[in-house]
Amino acid sequence: MSRRENTLLQGLSRLESRRNGHDPVWLKAFRHTALQRVSERGFPTAKDEAWKYTQIGRILDVAFEPAEADASLRLSSAAIDQLAGDLGGARLVFINGYFSPQCSSLKKLPEGVKVKSLASALAEEGESLEALLSRPFGEQTHAFTALNAACAEDGAFVQIPANTVIEEPIHLVFLSDPGAAFPAGPVVSHPRSLVLAGPGSRVTIVETYAGILDEVYLTNAVTEVILEEGAAVEHYKIQNETETAFHIALLDVRQERDTQFATHSVALGSLLARHEVTVGLHGPGAKATLNGLYMPQNEQHLDNPTTIDHIAPECISRELYKGVVDGRGRGVFDGRVIVRPGAMKTDSSQTNKNLLLSESARANTRPQLEIFADDVKCAHGATVGQLNEEVVFYLRTRGISQIAARNLLTYAFVGEMLELIRVQPLRSHVEKLVALRLSAGGVGMVAA
Amino acid sequence: MMLQIRNLHASVGGMEILRGLDLDVRAGEVHAIMGPNGSGKSTLAQVLVGRETYDVTGEVLYEGRNLLAMSPEQRAVEGVFLAFQYPVEIPGVGNLYFIRTALNMMRKQRGLDELDAMDFLALAKERMKFVEMDQSFMNRSVNTGFSGGETKRNEILQMAVLEPKLAILDETDSGLDIDALRIVANGVNALRSKERALLVITHYQRLLNYIVPDRVHVMANGRIVRSGDKHLALELEKNGYADFEQDTAGGARSAAGVTS
């Protein structure tokens, strides 16, 4: 292991001693294996295809310390509304990766529904989680995921029993407050969340990641969603960390027969963020929808790798990612669709569109189709373009200033993605964030 | 004088399209500009609303002020409007929202209060009658998936809402069937007033049966080569443009002697 890589690992021994006695034996062994994996494989470099556009030297250069739970950290619910929106349902708040009961509000949920912190789930029913949490890593697992496995102590645990429908969204809010954290200095948190949707159940999960102070910190999050036969999960992820932060995340989804999963990712924050989505379609008749919006500006680098793995036949996948890149920002979309032998009648489409707003803005788009089955329907398309100057001129002849015209057209490009957000209060919250982002360049332009 | 054009030249990529054009338009007048393809009619329209792709020299005074020094949005605020020959599609921007934004930006610039959604809707509904549009147009994206006739009606609707002082109609009749032509012409006629001047650019005389002009100008090779009253249009319909093109190719006749 190189000296650089030591920085992320150096806090581990302290973490280990602190945790001693808490973890069940299987978890100890699992963490040990995960850590070994980090050491063996090392952190990704530019030579790794999947990290080709995203160099992480800047992260490895920082001497991060693992964050610690601190019950004295508190935020008013108004402050949390401001940062993450008030969606009306249950809200679990995590500060620096640790559950904060004081800041959370758990509404009465239908019988059998479990919504709690992973730490308490481990304490109360650790043995039953062994099979779920100690799933062996796949080939693609990289050091950050393994590091999360080795270090994660808390996160959200959501379990919906069979045929249970929850109308109001369950909101998981991950706030970083490095200024208040112990130890002082750059901290890393490793939230690990698990969503189990029982057969025929239906639930909406919203994950929000936000920072409080413009300091350097790293969020290394892993969220796993498992849909049993006939389940439907709608998932949202709003990444609005501060522009000094690093954010590495994996959303891993497993879909059984006749399940429906949709995720909407909105990436606005972080200096460097990589939000990876991997979906395995394991049962026939499953449908996965992946939508994403990323809006890097200034020096931001926002990477969106996705993998949709069609393992079972007769599954559908739909993917639409849009990037708006301004300043010296860089947006990356890397979309893999794999159709395994036997996944006949796969129906897959993938679209990535990028809008560059400045001369120095950059976008990389890489759609990858790997088809090993016959009788499949797969379409994909990618574009990188600029605002249509003809249209800008038309708007100007109608008295709309050049800046307002550009904002209006940018908002129109983004609008399609916002309309896909079906949770109304969340849509309003995101619309505000996007309008704020666009108005930073000039005249404000709010949605119709 | 509302509009005074003197010795206007415009070129693009070294090619001269307008070659010393003169024109005077008073408030309340309707002027038709006719001419063969390539005579510079559309370039004149584009130059008047501030298209930046042309190198322009000469003088254009609008209400006594230097129009050429103004940005496109400033010209709009001052009351200059162009109904485009080919209006652009703007997917994702609702038509109603677009027109309201345009009106309110202009009102703001003129020091007037912005119209709220309800007041604007009432105004838009009233003006939509001018061009026989129903409200379904308003909820669609600007010109997106509109037929040729619908885009032209949408241009006249914008004109009806924005109430310009000088409106330029660039081949608004092209591609319209007779019913659509009648609707568009009725819409334009409803907007004729003492305070408003219209510059109607057209290739064919047909439109002028509906929008009767005070003056008709013939453009060829970047200049106005002849001016007259509405009878000139009928003459052109009969004899075509061939005479004028030959005339100017030889440089024999200039506009000076025949303008009003």
Image (cartoon, helix red, strand yellow):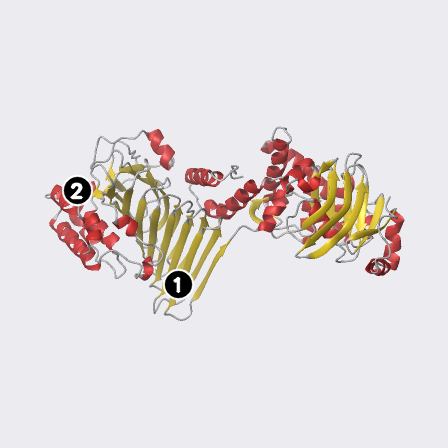
A286 or A294, which lies in front? Answer: A294
Q: Secondary structure at mark 1?
A: strand
Q: Secondary structure at mark 2?
A: helix
Q: Residue at x 30, y 61 (%)?
A: A48
Q: Is residue B238 left or right of residue A387?
A: right
Q: Is any part of residue A338 visible from this angle?
A: yes
Residue A413 location, x and y as percent?
51, 48
Is label 2 or label 1 in front? 1
Q: Is any part of residue A129 visible from this angle?
A: no
Q: Residues within 10 Å of mark 2 (few under 14, many from 20)?
A: few
Residue A194 location, x and y as percent?
26, 47
Rendered image quadrant of residue B24: top right
B176 or B27, which lies in front? Answer: B27
Q: Chain of mark 2?
A: A
Q: Chain of mark 1?
A: A
Query: Looking at the rendering, in which quadrant would you find the C terminus of chain B?
Result: top right
Residue A419 location, x and y as percent?
48, 45
Rendered image quadrant of residue B214: top right
Q: Amino acid at mark 2?
A: Glu
A442 or B203, which lies in front? Answer: A442
Q: Amino acid at mark 1?
A: Gln
Q: How many marks?
A: 2
Q: Which residue is mark 2?
A: A124
Specify the label residue A368 is tagged with: 1
Q: Marks 2 and 1, Cα distance to the nearest angstrom?
A: 43 Å
Residue B219 location, x and y as percent?
80, 53
Which callout, 2 or 1, points at the residue further toward the start of the chain? Answer: 2
Q: Residues within 10 Å of mark 1 (few under 14, many from 20)?
A: some
**Residue farthest bottom in this picture:** A374
